[in-house]
Image (cartoon, rainbow, N blue to C red):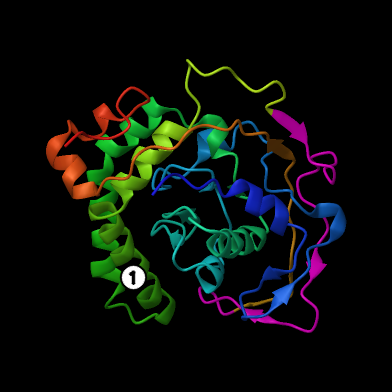
Amino acid sequence: MSYWDPLPAVRAAEAGPLPAPDGGTWLPSPEYRGRWWNPRPDRWAERDWRNVPGPFYGAGTDTCWMGRLIAPAHVLYDDEWGAEFAYRQPRDAAQALALLGAVAQDPMVGYACDGDVHWTPELVRDWWRERGRVREWAAALDRTWSVSDRSGEREAAGGGREYVAYIDTGLAEYLRHYVFWCPKADRPAPANPCRPCPSAGPDTGGGPRFALPGRELASPRFGTHVRGRRARGDLVRGMPAVPSTTSRTAARDLEKCSAIDSWGPAEPACDG
């Protein structure tokens, strides 16, 4: 398995229709499509530490808990404020569409999918070395929320269990391939790494609200009804083509390698 870049699928899908929390679909307002490409330079620095490395990340999203209604295999909530973050990156077009649908529902525009601009092999390795902190948090979330009297927390506890399982099995292989894909100092930068999204306008702090026609959606966290969402954002990154690595199982890699320190272009995977 090599790294699959979800951004072409995101660009192809962002005009809609996008999946909605009620199981239907909706069309984002044309002038505000594609506004999850991050016009705020400080958003990356504000990202939640629990985001798994990759293009998508949450950084100060809303707390209405809509994301898991659309993308439960990718979105989880923190237990301090209830904000959303990405615990699994998409690996195919269907997963990219689901996560994009969750991203587009956030009225605070706290998601971005420009992580490839920021992640480096060193940052990914640093994140992996500290994975025990993330795993401990996710396991504690499962223990606490699985016995909660709130149905939304009991449902989200399943995401905590999935995150623990993903860290234990699967994430190492994904990150090994992503390290080989993500930007490096020894790779020439593309001629035009960022271009304005055609629909982008001034960053005014949020676009106008647009309705989900004929729908009223209940927030699982607050029970309030949500009729529409707004979004903003504006940069699209042009990605250079790079080779993929050889697939290895996470268990074998971690047993025979010096963990993630061996990940890189010279040693994309372990021998033997």
Residue 70: within the magenta? no
Q: Is residue 49 visible?
A: yes
The percent position of residue 41, horizontal first and vertical second, equals: 64, 31
Residue 261 to residue 138: above or below: above
The percent position of residue 9, horizontal first and vertical second, equals: 64, 53
Asked whether, in this view, residue 233 is left or right of residue 242, the answer is right
Which residue of the protein is positioned furthest toward the left in this rendering?
Answer: 255
Label 1 environment density (alpha carbons within 10 Å; few <14, some 14–19, many ≥20): many
The percent position of residue 13, horizontal first and vertical second, equals: 70, 59
Q: Residue at x 30, y 30 (%)?
A: 263
Q: In this view of the protein, which residue sits in the foreground, 28 or 94?
A: 94
Q: How many callouts does the rendering have?
A: 1
Q: Residue at x 28, y 52 (%)?
A: 167
Residue 10 to residue 203: above or below: below
Look at the image and give the residue range highlighted in magenta. Answer: 194-223
Which quarter shows the C terminus? top left
Q: Residue at x 44, y 76 (%)?
A: 152
Residue 259 to residue 221: above or below: above
The percent position of residue 91, horizontal first and vertical second, equals: 48, 55
User: SS at mark 1?
Assistant: helix
Q: Is residue 109 visible?
A: no
Residue 219: within the magenta? yes
Q: In this view of the protein, which residue sits in the foreground, 95 or 209?
A: 95
The amino acid sitting under disc 1 is Ala
Q: Residue at x 26, y 33 (%)?
A: 260
Asked whether, in this view, residue 266 is left or right of residue 182, the answer is left
- Quarter location, residue 48: top left
Which residue of the protein is positioned furthest toward the front in this rendering?
Answer: 272
* Helix, strand or loop: magenta stretch: loop
Residue corresponding to mark 1: 157
